[in-house]
Amino acid sequence: MVNKIGVGYASVTELEKQYVLDALDSQRLSQGKYVAQFEKKFAQMHGQKYGAMCNSGTSALHLALEALKETDGWDSDTEVLVPAITFIATSNAVLHAGMKPVFVDVDLQTYNMDPSEIEKHITEHTRCIIPVHCFGMPCDMDKISAIAKKHGLRILEDCAESHFAKINGKTVGSFSDIMACSTYVAHTLTTGVGGVVCSNDSGLMEIVRSLLAHGRACTCERCIASDANTVCPKRMQTDMDRRFTFVRLGYSYRVGELEGALGLAQLERVDEIMGARHRNAEYLIRGLEGLEEYIQLPRCPENVEHTYMMFPILLKPGCGKSRDDMVRYLEKHNIETRPMLPLLNQPVYRKLFGEIEQAYPNAEYIDKNGFYIGCHHGLAEEDLDYEIETIKKYWGGGIKDPRLTAPEFTLCIAPLLRMLSDAGTRSGRKAGQRDV
């Protein structure tokens, strides 16, 4: 039996171990030089000046929204546009920030927010758009940016699934006022747990740094980046140490130095990791092209660079199969699957918003017919071949599985041999003789 082919993968090499051991040897587990270096490098690689690492992508979204809310004076009537297909964290963050998510249907080809659907949802209370680059596929940011500019809206890019994806050579995250990202274990680059907020706006980032550490007054980078014995001159400019002066109601969203060490090592291996994902996804696409009558494979325009956090598959209308049946088949054959980010049919959202899924037909279709499998950098060519062959076999066009063992082969072929034997016996009987 083949080992389980998972949808995610955490690659830990000697470089990650070296940095983590160095952090341990320094006896500093709270954020320090590794977190600071990771923040700066990650932000720069996404076209932003400033970065702040936190404990999750969900926290990153929440912090970004709270910073925008404080800066722009948003209130509980504020509406934020989010796609009708996304991981629930996107819209949950809006709710946790005390505002209202307004859903926008998605494009059936890209699975991202459909720009042609946005303006019908804009009201006098709309203040922000959160485009989510789902599965590693960038949104149409030129159109979304034009709409935001026309209506005076902020943009918060959710780049949790699309590290380093590009549009016309420009990296996602650099199209917005502020971006949020996740480095959870299942993502392309991982720190185990973690998230990052990035922006070119130093004012927004001051608020973010304050909020993630209980709302403290001290938000500069120097204290966390410096040696523990170095004292920042700003600390004692007031009657109370700024590190223990709290100016807003904040959160405990901080992350540790071990996560920063893992993250910095991952950034130094980005070409290796992302290159393998590209090759694997392209290999799967080539291998499954003959099935495009039945399933939709990930495709993107030439000016877009997909980063394939996962490999999405959508069953086409009239294909004669159900998503659930195909998923059960793949899982039975040790290929892990995940639903394609269903949102509006979630029990908690049906309770909060009612039965609204039918108002978003593309999202509803994807909810019922979409799933994804792994194409990560931990897969070998034989794993990809197994995925291709198994999917082809499901649709009736596969070749014999080379991994089939002798006992499995005997079980499969025995009924056929009995049938042939019975047919031969019947053909040798006298004319008119009946089977009994």
Image: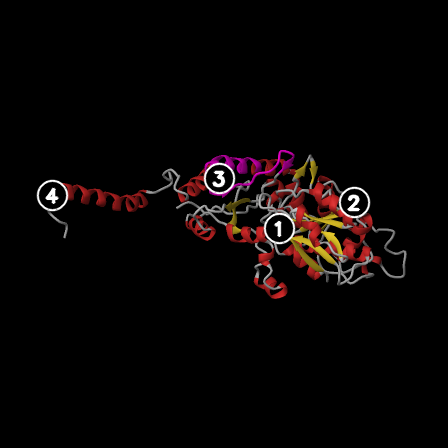
**C-alpha gap between disc 4 and disc 1:** 69 Å
Magenta segment: 278-305
Q: Comparing marks 2 and 1, which lies closer to the viewer?
A: 2
Q: Which mark is residue 200?
A: 2
Q: Which residue is mark 1?
A: 184
Q: Which mark is residue 429?
A: 4
Residue 92 location, quadrant: bottom right
SS assignment at label 4: loop
Indicate the amino acid at tag 3. Answer: Glu
Which residue was labeled with disc 3? Answer: 292
Q: Residue at x 63, y 37 (%)?
A: 305
Q: Secondary structure at mark 2?
A: loop
What residue occupies the far front of the structure in this picture?
120
What is the crowding at mark 3: few (fewer than 14 residues within 10 Å), some, or many (at least 20)?
A: some
Q: Is residue 389 left or right of residue 405?
A: right
Residue 51: percent from left, percent from top: 74, 47
Q: CA distance from mark 4 to mark 3?
A: 48 Å
